[in-house]
Amino acid sequence: MIKRFIPLGLLLITLTCSAQKMGELFKTMPQYVLPGFSEADKIMLLVDTALTSIPYPLGNIERINYTDDFLKIKTSNKGTLQIKLLPLINNTKIVCVVKTVCGQACDSQIQFYSTEWNPIESEPLLPHLSAEMFFDRSQKNNIDFEKALRLIDMEPIKAEFKGGSDDLTLILDYESYVSAENVELIKSFIKQDSITLRWNKTSFQN
């Protein structure tokens, strides 16, 4: 029998939080998560089903996907915001927020909160993300392994809740900002182009 344990600090936070749906959660979202987005904007974006986009200082905010436990919006021509309600083993939920910006490459920032928007430390919930996760470590003794790894100096990892699922898909987005020659070198050491982290109601596992 497999026993699952939830970190004590996380348990204490979630015991005080009631289960919520995405609409309620989004309305109480703090300004720092999406600066410049007003309470009226939030209501308009979610309540008016015929309205898929509204004006925003950086360009229109566009609703891409909206369910009871997931919201994905386009915040600019280069940015997206995903908010996911994740179930815990004690029948409460926590919030995972993924902000992605795509310039030369796409890079995602992942943060966790209680349903009352109190920040939660990510370390027990998410493994350390690095380009090396995508590499074939059986080739580590190859003289060019470290060279290929150093070429990916930006750690351009894009995170996506595909279809609004509880699992998080990671993509190493390096091809657009390194030379064609270096792309081929890196590819020779890549084990997989994407990694799916499974949510087991306590943490994401590779």
Image (tube, helix red, strand yellow):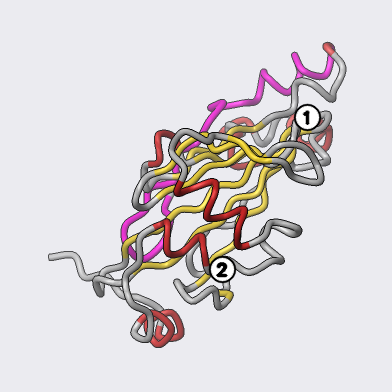
Kindly identify the residue that appears in the image at 84 percent across and 12 percent down.
181
Seen in the image, is 99 located left or right of residue 44? right
Labelled pair 2, 1 in contact (Cβ < 8 Å): no
Above-or-below relation of 179 to 74: above
Q: Crowdedness of circle 1 by 10 Å Cα count: few (<14), some, many (20+)?
A: many
Residue that lies at the very extreme toward the right in this rendered image: 179
Q: Which residue is mark 1?
A: 148
Please state the extent of the stretch shown in magenta in the rendering.
Answer: 181-205
- Whether residue 186 appears in magenta in the rendering, the answer is yes
Q: Is residue 205 visible?
A: yes
Q: Residue at x 56, y 26 (%)?
A: 193
Of the numbered discs 2 and 1, the one sitting upstream in the chain is 2
Image-based side of 55 in relation to 159, left or right: right
Q: Position of residue 25 (x, y in %)?
A: 46, 64
The disc at residue 123 is: 2
User: Which percent across, then down, holds residue 136?
Assistant: 58, 31
